[in-house]
């Protein structure tokens, strides 16, 4: 018994065992990701619709009704397949959307742009401030938040960026509007509202240019999930999320909320639905991004009632292919 314990302790303390374990784990993870990516690419080549509906069934437990969509997720899928407006691509592009915001007289709410790059080799890290954010412009989750440049692993950062730049994000979940985005890296100023590692995010759901509700993401960190709550236009809490029904909390209305609503409605006017995201940094409203397919049209965070309430607000336009 003591011998087994000693072996276990040795394994825990041994650098080479730890290294072997990590290498094996990383190898298995990478193999799984490659297999999953290959499977998705095959489905995408066969049909983007097949890829998305297959994923929808896996997550939601049933196939979407695209002939007569009723729920929010089904209507988002319908828009993704059958309403391919060029503005969707422009506004989903994290760099190109900046000009769209400027055209609406809202340049003052844009975050400071520190650089635009075709690839990671163009980034001159020495010239960047101590804190900054790097983003790839053609997808979601391709972000590196640096809050201390002295501890940043530049080589690892460049490897991540280069890997992300090779990804055709449209083939992951079938979101075709991402396929036509020019792939770039942008560097923006670091934002912090002192509430957590990442600032509170205010995501405004807009239907035909009218704001209906705001999903607030609090206690955001780089390593874990945020907490979510939804409030209506008058800042009354809505029972739309499964998780928020289990807790008793109230999120104060942010300074500049009316400015957020006004900006969201200006920017969302051409679209049947879009979610416009903002931050509030020391009372100043800062634009985040525009999202047309939240959760890739498979959001299972909503209650059943909420899916149909939101679905009733989304009026489908004529097809545009």
Image: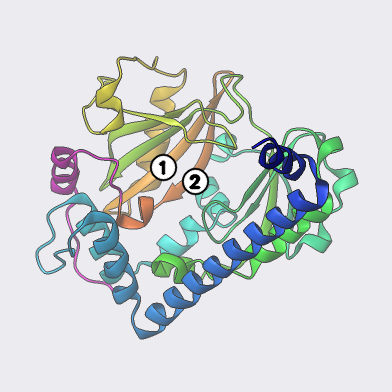
In front of the other: 298 or 232:
298
Instruction: Determine the image quadrant of residue 107.
Output: top right
| Residue found 59% across the figure and 64% down from its top | 28
Residue hosting label 1: 276
Q: Is residue 184 visible?
A: no
Above/below status of 97 relative to 183: above
Residue 97, compared with residue 234, is above or below; it is below
Q: Does residue 10 appear to the left or right of 274 in the view shown?
A: right
Q: Is residue 251 visible?
A: yes
What are the residue bounds of the magenta stretch? Answer: 299-321
| Quadrant in the rendering for residue 87 | bottom left
- Outermost residue, right direction? 126
Please tell me whether mark 2 sits on a helix, a strand or a loop.
Answer: strand
Along the viewing direction, whichever of 36 and 197 lies nearer the viewer: 36
Residue at 55% x, 51% y is 141
Q: Earlier in the sequence, mark 1 or mark 2?
A: 1
Left of 45 or right of it: where is 247?
Answer: left
The residue drawn where x is 67% and y is 65% is 163
Q: Around disc 1, counting alpha carbons within 10 Å, would you say few (fewer than 14), some (14 to 19), or many (20 or more)? A: many
| Residue with the mark numbered 2 | 289
List x then y, in percent, for residue 197: 61, 28
Rounded to the nearest whole Å, what is the CA distance between mark 1 and mark 2? 6 Å
Q: Secondary structure at mark 1?
A: strand
Please tell me whether residue 231 is drawn above or below residue 182 in the rendered image. above
Residue closest to the eye, 290 or 63 = 63
Quadrant position of residue 29: bottom right
Residue name at image x 59 percent, y 22 percent: 193
Magenta-drawn stretch contains 51: no
Residue 146 falls left or right of residue 243: right
Marking on residue 42: none
């Amino acid at each position: 018994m003591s011998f087994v314990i000693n072996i276990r302790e040795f394994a825990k303390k041994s650098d080479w065992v730890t290294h072997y374990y990590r290498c094996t784990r990383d190898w298995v993870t990478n193999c799984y990701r490659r297999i999953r990516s290959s499977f998705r690419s095959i489905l995408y080549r066969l049909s983007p619709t097949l890829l998305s509906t297959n994923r929808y069934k896996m997550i939601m437990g049933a196939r979407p009704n695209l002939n007569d969509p009723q729920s929010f997720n089904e209507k988002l899928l319908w828009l993704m397949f059958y309403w391919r407006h060029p503005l969707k691509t422009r506004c989903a592009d994290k760099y190109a959307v900046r000009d769209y915001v400027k055209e609406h007289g809202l340049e003052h709410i844009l975050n400071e742009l520190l650089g635009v790059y075709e690839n990671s080799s163009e980034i001159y890290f020495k010239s960047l401030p101590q804190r900054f954010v790097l983003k790839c412009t053609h997808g979601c989750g391709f972000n590196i938040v640096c809050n201390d440049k002295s501890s940043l692993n530049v080589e690892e950062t460049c490897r991540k960026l280069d890997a992300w730049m090779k990804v055709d994000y449209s083939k992951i979940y079938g979101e075709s509007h991402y396929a036509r985005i020019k792939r770039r890296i942008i560097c923006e100023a670091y934002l912090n509202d002192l509430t957590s590692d990442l600032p509170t995010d205010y995501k405004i759901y807009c239907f035909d240019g009218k704001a209906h509700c705001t999903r607030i993401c609090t206690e955001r960190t780089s390593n874990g999930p945020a907490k979510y709550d939804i409030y209506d236009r008058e800042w009354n809490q809505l029972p739309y999320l499964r998780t928020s029904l289990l807790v008793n909390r109230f999120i104060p209305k942010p300074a500049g909320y009316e400015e957020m609503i006004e900006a969201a409605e200006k920017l969302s006017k051409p679209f049947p639905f879009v979610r416009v995201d903002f931050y509030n940094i020391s009372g100043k409203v800062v634009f985040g991004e525009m999202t047309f397919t939240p959760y890739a049209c498979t959001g299972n965070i909503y209650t059943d009632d909420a899916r149909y309430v939101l679905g009733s607000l989304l009026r489908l336009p004529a097809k545009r292919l």
